[in-house]
Image (spheres, rainbow, N blue to C red):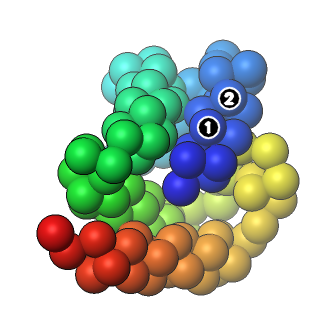
Amino acid sequence: FIILFIYTAASKLFTINSFASTLAKSPLIGNMNYVVAWGIPIIEVIISIVLIFPSFRRVGLYAALTLMVAFTIYLAYMILSDNKLPCHCGGVISTMSWQQHIWFNMGFIVLAITGLVINRK
């Protein structure tokens, strides 16, 4: 998660105007595009930092799980609403189709749940 979130956050931040422009076209985000464009990578970095510290790792895993579920719900909405917006998730991940991205996210959701089970303290 640390590598994934730092990678995607950096990619979004390096192309923040393009990312915000894409988000502005989303029916769910619209005028909140700049808040979301800055908020997502900041949240990804915060979660990554939290995951580094063993005493906060469980909180970080719950946050990562929540973020991945939210992203997956958004992707499902975009597929079901038949919007044809490009994915601007960052780097090579943005080359995936919406369906591939859902499977990718599902893998990370399983990873977060596995981490929570292993880290049950």
Of residues 95 and 50, the one drawn nearer to the viewer in this rendering: 50
Query: Looking at the rendering, in which quadrant would you find the C terminus?
Result: bottom left
Residue 97 locus on image (x, y percent): 74, 71
User: Residues under labels 2 and 1: Cα distance?
Assistant: 6 Å
- Residue type for callout 1: Ile
- Residue 64 higher or lower than 35, as above or below: below
Q: Say whether residue 107 is left or right of residue 10.
A: left
Q: Residue at x 61, y 37 (%)?
A: 6
- Residue 104 higher or lower than 52, as above or below: below
Q: Residue at x 43, y 33 (%)?
A: 49
Where does label 1 land, which residue? 6
Q: Residue 44: which disc? A: none
Q: Residue at x 73, y 23 (%)?
A: 15
Where does label 2 land, which residue? 10
Can residue 92 be seen at all in this image of the molecule?
Answer: yes
Residues under numbered marks 2 and 1 in contact, where contact means CB atoms less than 8 Å apart = yes
- Residue type for callout 2: Ala
- Residue 68 higher or lower than 91, as above or below: below
Can residue 33 be seen at all in this image of the molecule?
Answer: no
Judged from the image, the secondary structure of the residue bearing numbered disc 1 is helix
Of residues 84 and 50, the one drawn nearer to the viewer in this rendering: 50
Of residues 86 and 39, the one drawn nearer to the viewer in this rendering: 39
Residue 108 locus on image (x, y percent): 51, 72
Name which quarter of the figure residue 71 lies in: bottom left
